[in-house]
Structure formats: structure tokens, C-alpha cells
Image: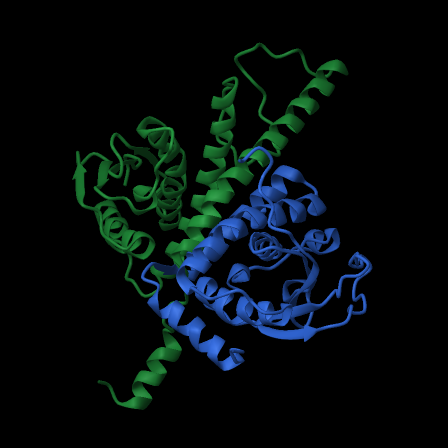
Amino acid sequence: MATTSKQYKAIGEDLWKSRTDKINSELFSLTYGALVVQLIQDYEDYAEVNKQLEKMGYNIGTRLIEDFLARSSLGRCSDFREVGEVAAKVGFKSFLNITPTVTHSGAPPPSARPTSTVQQSGVPGSSFILTLDENPLAEFVELPDEALEGGLWFSNVLCGVLRGALEMVQMQVQAEFLSDVLRGDESTEIRVTLLKYLEEEVPVGDD
Amino acid sequence: MQAAPVSALGTLADPPARMVDGAAMDYLLIEAVNALRVSSAVASARAKKIERDMVEAGLVPPPPTTAKQQNPRDSTSSTSGKISGPADEDEGVRSRLEAIGMHIGGNFVERLCRDRPLFSDSLDVIKFVCKDLWVSCWDKQVDNLRTNHRGVYVLQDNAFKPITRISSWEGRQEALKRAKLYVALPAGIIRGALSRIGFQGTVVPEITTLPQCTFQIKLPKNT
């Protein structure tokens, strides 16, 4: 039975309300901001910082998905479109208390940035774009010119979280920022593209 | 219940705090420690390389093994000596966590103190830390406050939230060791808060048994 968008929204709201352990989002924003600053100081290379944030996000995502599945008891998504809906309306809502809007795209999307997505042949390449109206990570944040020129994606950890979480449910995706209000763009957008479905594998030597 | 227009204005002036899930913060902190361990190693490797290059170029005499010239760009690090091996690594992470904590504490306390009158004395400030800051960050008040009335305060929390859920499959000792590292962030928060209020003190956390934690705050004599 297909769950409608509204139903997912309601599920997300319920999950959020049922959470007992909530913290002030300012604390969260300040923590993340200070962390990014520290990484910039340590690496002195914005591309590397982007990579490290994504990696951090990946590790977080692999744990987060377990938490999410345990709380939400949602079943397997029937298609990638549903993945986008669930991620936006239930996932983001229950952890960050925000509901990004989702725009789906079945066909390989036109490349909006110089670094284009690598499409594997035979894979649909369907994707969805999450548009974040508000971003708790980026509260109080202003990027200096250096960071803008260096190509820093401040909230890149979110891309990693999406990639890590979805990999744990057998989907290999690529998540990347298309635009960010911190960079002066109109909106903050993340595009998640399905690369392929992963086979459930038993790790070598595990039996 | 207040009349609708009044409460609407009240909400506009003082909006309810936005919240995020506590678990998200926990996961972020766990991975932040790992990320900082790596980045701290990268930064110190770079500092060592610069030092080696300078020594080779003859600009700097080779340093004795115990004292080390601090890389001026490592402005957030508070270490002044060199300890070899994993302790050095841990010190790098610990000082970074404290620096992050100071940033959080300083900025957060500005928001907390917005509607508050000026602090009357240092005891007043400490009480604010024990009550308002603790509640905003860790959902409870400090359990015990002791002072020698000469600028040293000991705050005791019997179930300190950041460390209540720390456990290690390697056993209690390992868990304790990790807790001691993690607690650098809250210590930084307290220190940053005090600093922003105007009191440059030191905050030393101490854990003997989980989840109890004490913080020893030393404020300068003239306050």
C-alpha cells in the first residue's frame, strides 16, 4: 500500500514528538560550527575539509539508520522515489526537526555543476533533490571569502549521512550539494542520485 | 491563559527554542572525536615537517627532546610540552574538544544572559553556571557545590549527562579513559561561558566513577 506524502509527514511529526531526549538546536549549531572551524585550521585545505565532513557524515549515517529503523519501524521502500519521501519527511524530521522539500527526477538530471555525477551504465540514475528551507547546522554562520573561494560546503556532513544511511539499506548513492544559502545561492539543495542497489553480502570468513 | 494578542507578541519577542534530537548530537560528538583525532594528527605532522624543514635550513637549532616550539598556527592548542605516542594524540584531541567547548559556551551564554541583570559577584556567576547553564545544556542542575570562598569552586554532578551512556566492551577502565576525554568538551563549555561573562578561570574535570563527574573551577583572586 503506497503511503502518501501526507502520511509520511504525520509519521515524521509523531516520531519527533515521541522523542524524549531533545536538545537546544543552538548547542548543536555551535558545536558543528566550531568543529568545522577546527577542521579548517587543521587541514588548511577546503576540499579536504569537504571530504572529511562527508566521511564523518558517512560514519554517523551508518549508525543513524539503525536508530531510525528501530524507532520508525517503517518497512522497505518500494522505489527510490519513496526513499526520498521517507528521508525528507521522516528522517530529517525526527533527527533535525526540519522537513526539506523533495523534488524527484527519474531520468539522469542535467549537470548543474562542473563536477558531474558518474552514471553507471544500465542503472536508472534516478535522483531526488532535497531543498532545505532551514538548516540547523548553519545557524549563525557566515562564510568568509576564503571559504567561498575554496569551495567549502559547510553542511557536507549531511551528504555523508545520507550516503552512509542508505548504504546500510542496500543502496549505493551519491549525495552532493548543488547550492547553499551560505554561499549566497538562492536555496540549499542536496541531490541524491542512486548509483546501484547493493547485494546483501555475507562478509568474507563470517561463516 | 493569556489573551491571544499578548501571547502572540510574547512568542514573537521570545520564540520557543528550536530543538533537535539528542541522539543526533550524540552521534555528531562521537564522530567528531574520531575526526579530530585524525585532523589533529595531520596538523601535528605538518607542524613537525615545518620544524624539520626549518632545522634543515639552519634557521632553528635542533630542539631538545622535551621542549617543543609550538606551531603559531595551532592557535587552539593549549599544550606546551611534548608527550610522545598516543598520549600526545589524545592531548591534541582533548585540547581541540576544549576549544570547541569554549566556543559553544561563550556564544551560548550570551543568549542565555540576554534578559538577565548583571552578575553581582563570582558566587552569583557560579550559581548561574550550576543552575541555568547546566539545565540548558544537560537538563538538570548541579548536585553539589562546594567552595573555599577563595576563588575555588567544586561542582559535582552525580549523573553527568554526556557521560551517562559511555560504556566500553573493553571494560570499565577503558570506559573511564574515554569519558575523561569526552568530558573535555563540557569543561570547555563551562570555561567559555565564564570567560564570556568576564571571569578568566580554569576548569578541571575529574571523574573517579562513572557517571559522576566533578569540575574544579579556579577563578582569579581579585574577583
In the image, is B55 to the left or to the right of B111? right
In the image, is A54 to the left or to the right of B101? right
- Please tell me which residue lies in front, B28 or A192: A192
- Please tell me which residue lies in front, A84 or A199: A199
Residue A104 percent coordinates (x, y): 67, 74
Residue A187 percent coordinates (x, y): 65, 71
- Please tell me which residue lies in front, B33 or A128: A128
Residue A186, by quadrant, is bottom right
Answer whether residue A141 is visible to the viewer in this image.
yes
Residue A85, by quadrant, is bottom right
In the image, is A91 to the left or to the right of B54? left
Residue A63 percent coordinates (x, y): 49, 49
Answer whether residue B107 is visible to the viewer in this image.
no
Task: Determine the residue positioned at 39% across, 68% down.
Answer: A15
Report the number of numbered marks.
Answer: 0
Please, which residue is most extreme toward the front here? A207
Q: What colouring method underlies this structural image? A: by chain
Chain letter of the blue region: A
In the image, is B94 to the left or to the right of A85? left
In the rendered image, the vertical position of residue B23 relative to residue B176, given as above or below: below
Residue B129 percent coordinates (x, y): 28, 49
Task: Determine the residue positioned at 62% across, 34% down.
Answer: B73
- Please tell me which residue lies in front, A132 or B84: A132
Task: Determine the residue positioned at 42% across, 64% down.
Answer: A73
Chain letter of the green region: B
In the rendered image, the vertical position of residue A147 relative to residue A131, given as above or below: above
Residue A70, by quadrant, is bottom left
